Amino acid sequence: MKVLAITVPLAYTIMSVLGVSIYLVGDSTMAAQLPSSGMEGWGVPFQRYLTGVTLVNKARSGRSARSYWRERRWAEVQSLLRKGDYVIISFGHNDGAPGTPLTNDRLPVGGEGSDTIRNGTVETVYTWPTYIKWMIDGARSKGANPIISSRTANNPYGRSNFTSVSYNPNRVYMLGKDTTQSFFPFENTHTNAQAGANAVAQAFLSALRCPSAKGVLRSYINSAGQKFPARCTRP
């Protein structure tokens, strides 16, 4: 009984010290990259705009919602979540890769329902919304707050068939073509480790200031992060 009397208060003390965490779940456009690559995901510079919260970047390059789930990476994140935590979920680039769910192990079944398909292995493949819903439900089951972020936009000035009205293109359109092109020195998807990744992080911060965000994360954004004005529509 003495052990229990000590252990329970200690557990609460540890939780109090750890505080709130923000987990990032997504692909290479959010993930940390090797310094030698020259690339960086926006989740890395996002840290510099936070205060009073711990950022845990669990995004991984090359992952789709399906492969992140299959590899049990989400299961790991869910096991770490505590009440009051946040998890930002952003997939899309690898979920629409060439091929079919039978030939590409990152692709979901098409559609928005709960259709499934057997791919010749033990895996049952589900639709993209199904995987995202499972993550949302898993976060909420732990008392955490899921935030769904749209896919990080490609370079709007590059050769891409992807058109977006999200906050990221809004941000780069205002910066102009030459500046934007410098953010994507490799191809039209991955930003460089300096200004490019930081510009996307700033675009996310601007989105958080829009009315539709309902003030989420506001208390954890420091003075540097608060200076980016809301940009809620594309110019």
Image (cartoon, rainbow, N blue to C red):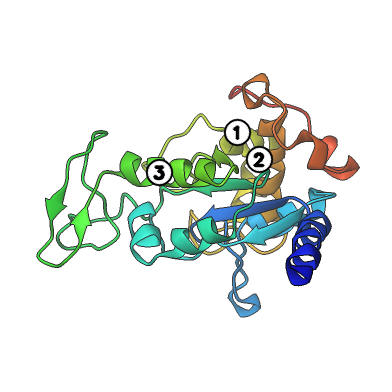
Residue 144 lies in what quarter of the image? top right
Quarter of the image where the N terminus is located: bottom right
The residue at the far front in this view is 1
Residue 166 lies in what quarter of the image? top right
Name the residue located 57 percent from the left edge and 62 percent from the top edge.
58
Residue 106: horizontal and vertical position, in percent? 30, 59
Q: Can you identify the residue that label 2 sits on?
A: 204
C-alpha gap between disc 2 and disc 1 = 7 Å
Position of residue 28 in the picture relative to residue 66 (left or right) = right
Q: Secondary structure at mark 1?
A: helix
Crowd around label 1: few <14 · some 14–19 · many ≥20 (10 Å): many
Q: Is residue 157 visible?
A: no
Crowd around label 3: few <14 · some 14–19 · many ≥20 (10 Å): some
Q: Can you identify the residue that label 3 sits on?
A: 132
Residue 177 lies in what quarter of the image? top right
Q: Secondary structure at mark 2?
A: helix
Q: Can you identify the residue that label 1 sits on?
A: 167
Name which residue type carries label 3.
Ile
Crowd around label 2: few <14 · some 14–19 · many ≥20 (10 Å): many
| Depth check, front residue: 66 or 93 | 66
Name which residue type carries label 2.
Phe
Position of residue 225 in the picture relative to residue 233 (left or right) = right
Residue 218: horizontal and vertical position, in percent? 77, 34
C-alpha gap between disc 3 and disc 1 = 21 Å
